[in-house]
Image (cartoon, helix red, strand yellow):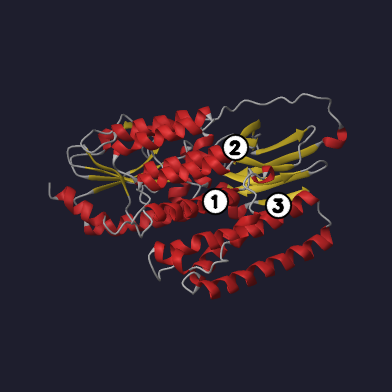
Amino acid sequence: MKYLYLLLLLGISLTSCKKDGKETEEGIAYFGGEVINPSTNYVILLQANSVIDTFTLDSKNRFIYKLKNVSPGLYTFSHGGEIQMVLLEPNDSIMFRLNTMEFDESLVYTGAGAKKNNYLIDLFLNGEHEDQVVLGFSQLSPQIFEEKLDSLKELKLKKLKAFNSKQSPSELFIHLAESSIDIQYNLSKEVYPFVNYGNTERGNFESLPNNFYDYREKINYNDPYLVDYFPYSSFLKHHFENLALAKHFKSSKDSIYSKQSIEYNLVRLQIIDSLMTNENIKNSLLISATLEFISNNKNVDDYDKILNYFLNTSTNAQHKEYANKIVNSLKSLKSGNPLPDIVVFDISNKELNLKTVLGDKPCVIFFWSQSNMMRVQECHNKVDELKQKYPEITFIGINANNDNQDLWKKTLEKYKLNTENEFIFKNPKEAQQSLAIYPINKVIIVDKNGKIENSHSNMFSINFEEELLGVLNQ
């Protein structure tokens, strides 16, 4: 969800917003930071998907900003295709420091208001690590799984109580921290039927205790303070998947969860539309569900049914424009069509049309991003393995979210990646749209004649090597 959010931000204007009303010293806060290895020369501050301002980095890659009549709440700041959260309240003076090579993990806040933000960031990052622990619990029975989950939640609540007793934070912070703990707990329970390998999804649903989802009665679907909290959107996404699948099972004979089912996905959009009233959250969930269906379904004839429902329910004009363009791009990327004209740079800064680097052999084009360095290593390791098995195929890697050639080259050097057949887009935003690069782990397979074989493959799929053999045997 976080990376989809970033793609949508690319279309947002980078203009500043002016606030009306008399400025008061009591309502002032300061926000600034230092970016190491910047991928652009600016940082964007947003709240509820609206741009507050854009800050230009100075010669030392730093900035400082004075917020007048600050509205207490979570904000987000974006740099080079990556994004993170910050809680700002009156009288805060918060500075961050981060390295784009490890964006989230390197982020540290200092200054007045830093402790509460470092606590929230730790909750967020620990939640990501905790997912692996909970994944192991998910193979247990529902009762034992719930007991272990309760223990994790209780431990976090005790730590929060100790922090609050020392720091005396605001009611807003306490609400956000408690919500973060609840969301992680609830998310784990929503995901359980999908990751437990004991039965089919239908079987897992039917085996759950009657009170397993009792917490749903207390869900606030439209909490305005959680609009910019990434895990909240992730929880709602999985929650609505569950509700839609349960409803879908009642009217169908399906026993498994199919992301490609148009009936299921229409139900999912309908439930989001019926339960959400906060337009920012609702629109984000609608675009996420729509793009997820489109990205998992290779039948372009099904796109318009989902797209039309989305266009009739979303109130976000930019989301509508983006979804329309993605669908049109995917239709043009059908099997048998040539690639669109895309300009790239090679390691020597030579400007090339992507078509010209394909050569006369079948090609696999894969994409990577500075925002997920683990993926950079994983995909290149996989490519090295595939190169040994299939020397008749050319593998082309493209940095998809960045036009900073120096940072791109530093990344290649840092991870000791072979620079042959590595490229960077000249215009990332346009290229992402033309090639419909969502999600980032998609792979495009092209035959020896430069025609698209599959515009939406996955090199980690169990069927991927069968696809490669198929294109070689043509």
Is label 3 in a helix, a strand or a loop?
helix
Residue to which mark 2 is pinned = 280
Neighbour tally class for label 3: few under 14, some 14-19, many 20 plus, Cα within 10 Å: some
Q: Say which amino acid is labelled 2.
A: Asn
Residue to which mark 3 is pinned = 176
Q: Nearer the viewer, mark 3 or mark 2?
A: 2
Residue to which mark 1 is pinned = 234
Image coords of residue 42 (percent x, y): 60, 34
Instruction: Mark yes or no: residue 81 visible.
Output: no
Closer to the camera in the image, 45 or 279 = 279
Is label 1 in a helix, a strand or a loop?
helix
Number of callouts in the render?
A: 3
Left or right, residue 118 beside residue 325:
right
Left or right, residue 24 beside residue 224:
right
Image coords of residue 32 (percent x, y): 71, 40
Instruction: Mark yes or no: residue 375 visible.
Output: yes
Q: Say which amino acid is labelled 1.
A: Ser
**In the picture shown, does residue 42 fall above or below 198?**
above
Image coords of residue 208 (percent x, y): 50, 68
Closer to the camera in the image, 379 or 119 = 119
**Cα separation between marks 3 and 2:** 18 Å
* Residue at screen point 27% across, 54% down: 464
Mark sitting earlier along the chain (3/1): 3
Q: Say which amino acid is labelled 3.
A: Leu
